[in-house]
Amino acid sequence: MQDMNVVIAGAAGEGVQTVGDILAHTISAQGYAAFTWQEYESRIRGGQNSYSIRIGEKPQNAPLLPADVLLALNEGAVKKYEPLLKEEGTLLAQNQLRERMIAIPFVEIAEEELGDKIYADTIAAGALVGVLGIDLDTLKQVLVEKFRRKGNEVVESNLSAAEEGYRRATQGCKDMCPWKLPRRGGRYYLISGNEAIPLAAAFAGCRFIAAYPMTPSTGIITYLAREEELLGVFAEQAEDEIAAVNMALGASYAGARAMTATSGGGFALMVEGVSLAGMTETPLVIVLAQRPGPATGLPTRTAQGELLFAINAGHGEFPKLVLAPSNPYDAFHKIVKAFNLADKYQMPVIVLTDHFLADSQFSVSDFDLGTAGPGFYLADPQEIRDYKRYRLTEHGISPRLYPGQSEHLVGVDSDEHDEEGHITEDLGATVRAMVQKRLAKIDGLKKEISLPEEISVNDVDTVLVGWGSSRGALLEGLSLLKQEGKKAGMIHFTELWPLPEFTFPEGKTYITVESNATGQLARLLRSEYDVSFQGTINRYDGLPLTGEYIRSYFNEYYG
Amino acid sequence: MSTMDDYHNNVEIQWCPGCPNFGILQAFKKALVELNRAPHEVCMVSGIGQAAKLPHYLRCNFFNGLHGRTLPVALGVHVANPKLNTIVVTGDGDCYGEGGNHFIHTLRRNPDITVVVHNNEIYALTKGQASPTTPRGERRMLQFGGVELAPLNPLAIAILHGCGFVARGFAGNIEHLKGLLVEAISYRGFSYVDVIQPCITWGTHPVSWYRERIYTIGDDYDPGNREAALEKSMEWGERMPIGVIYKTPPAEVFAGRFRKAVGDRPLPELQPPGREKILELLSGFRAAEGSP
């Protein structure tokens, strides 16, 4: 089958999310790979939002914009999203607004036949399942699972609602529902970045998270707070981001793996703490979930605008690691790596995600943990006689103990310090030695960095270069170009600072693809690798990069 | 038994000669010896300022962090290892100025830590600017026409926001201050001691001026009475009370529910959830086998 796209649109509070979640899980249970992404306004009620579900036999984790089916929960949603509907697509709404459509008054039916308008969402989900040719039983099973805890009566009413929606849709379909999605054997994990990250953190041995709520990072601490006792990760909502980063540093100094999560504005407040982690050599993991700036920007939209900010964050010079996972599976593994390397090199690690990666649900065939696991690097106090927290060593890494672990005393300082952590102004010897010791860690760190992913680079003249969460869109862009007979390759970075030893093949045309206006990756790579770029495919309207966007932009400017 | 020598180190002290901070340092050592705490059981957290250097002059674990950020750091230490005696050493600029927001919210949390504020009513390290506790009208190095802002009353703030142990000491009365520190460190919950520490370099008044006005709260005072404590906290000027101003029976400390679930061991000693549990949680994101 060709991948198809279902869009559910309506006002905030109208059930867009509920209907979308039910349908996405039904598609997954039916054995298909779903990819969901949402775009919504920064408000609690009203506005017009959408929840898009891409359906395919194999995971294609990138958004499609044109809709095969549009469910619009109000007339404003029809107006806003109808342009997305393909000519042969099917519109589903409450009232008859045009000739070719299916009208089902969900709310009216819910009130009159089921006694509560709350069932309108399930009626709509039933209708979509009917339109798409999915087994009603699959939906019913998802509903039983979803409402089991609310008791039999609620389950039964939802099942009736689903049947009613399904019946009305199949009756109304006539020639408008050509799709058939019979049950198949695929089994996929349907998971978002903000779900994979907290699980990975717990797996990596994280024991402490402090954060201040900020879209799109909030899901991470929310998950850990909900599972606090099960996972043994203490979660605290701090009074501000400055407190959050310092709390995490306190816990980390005391031996607990610790993290925080925020977005650009909150990260700006944390930056002094990044520097503190660098100076005190305290391990710290920060998830920086990007959204468009500057300042408050577009709180609920996506961007890749903090690359250079993250790399340069913190006054003074000290080693840090910046990672940018491409999808939830990658994010899981990158988070484990982040905790392990933060511990090994005693430094801050920034993991860049964005609204698109944080909230979109990706289908993953096999969530293989591989050899990943927590690796701990605390020293053994019994092997040390005369302990000094900042003992000078060849590789710059001093044995790290935590306070109270033994009779050894652990002193750390934000001032320049001597080996015992005491304030120093010994400029000639101690200060130089400490600066060199901290920076010496970069040599070892560089060897831990993975190379970028390369696709078809040797066989083509034109190479698209991207980073982070746009990998899916880049892959789709390449295949769309290929269908047009245009050959392009790809180089994709997920480990961005320090950059790995890598050589860009000569004689190619390089074009960066980025969700920002100034081509930050191009600037970084130019300065580090002395590579030149012939162009940039930018997107900075708050919407995610798509394969189609890359294809048409490429054709317009570089084709 | 721990001794004064256990707490001695050879670090050169950078305070001005004769600074009342020496009295506070002495009181700390005496209190820790009286409590029979070993240096490795103590973790001092400080920020920036003259007070913040104290942990360097006393053998113990220490985190000398950023200006104003002592309390969040101490909170993290306390959650990670509640067995440590976590003591924050800070000043009026560090705690009430730069860290004012943290002061308010850490009071609300009631972590089992002790906070000792060297209150000299001035920014000494940056050479004499006004602090949040400088009295109105006093001239400072940046407030040439006199301070226009109303001074903060941090003791009243603490009493009003859930602190169960509020005291004021005087750096010039080491024995009395030692007694307060012993009681504060022994208290289970957030204990807070504001210490009058006249600045002999930049301050308006000499130590003797304070000595004339300071009096020790008598045995007839009931520190369990919140209204009386608030009233006592507002007594300032011609008469300055020192002693325990407010003390309540200990309440549930911060992270108590979490600690009931995971036990009281330091967090780095706990085993991570493990592969099986994570795979089980991950399987919740996958449609059930053979479904429906």
Image (spheres, coloured by chain):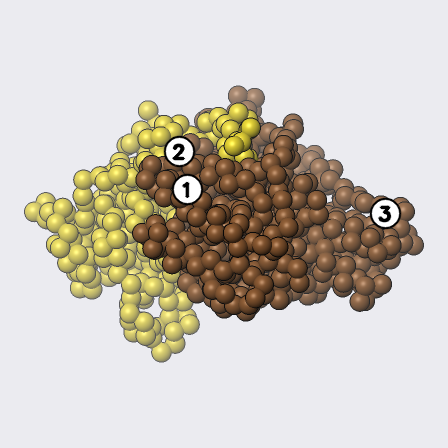
> Which of A200/B49 is in front?
A200
Which chain is represented by brown in the image?
Answer: A
- The x, y position of residue A403, in whole percent, is 46, 33
Residue at horizontal 62 percent and vertical 66 percent from the top: A83
> Which of B226/A101 is in front?
A101
Apparent colour of chain B:
yellow
User: Which amino acid type is marked by label 1?
Assistant: Leu
Residue under pointer 3:
A457
Chain under label 2? A
Does label 3 or label 2 sit earlier along the sequence?
Answer: 2
Q: Nearer the observer, disc 3 or disc 1?
A: 1
Element class at badge 3: helix
Is residue B46 visible to the viewer in this orientation of the structure? no
Residue at horizontal 23 percent and vertical 40 percent from the top: B251
Q: Nearer the observer, disc 3 or disc 2?
A: 3
Q: Mark on residue A229?
A: 2
Residue at horizontal 40 percent and vertical 67 percent from the top: B129
- The x, y position of residue A379, in whole percent, is 56, 27
Q: Mark on residue A159?
A: 1
Chain under label 3? A
Residue at horizontal 83 percent and vertical 52 percent from the top: A482
Chain under label 1? A
Q: Kindly indicate whether the residues beneath marks 3 and 2 are on one polypeptide chain.
A: yes
> Which of A59/A432 is in front?
A59
- The x, y position of residue B22, in whole percent, is 36, 47
Element class at badge 1: helix
From the viewer's perspective, tell me whether residue B229 is left or right of residue B194: left
* Vertical side of B247 occupied by B199: above or below: below
- The x, y position of residue A425, in whole percent, is 57, 50
Marks 3 & 2, CB-CB < 8 Å contact: no
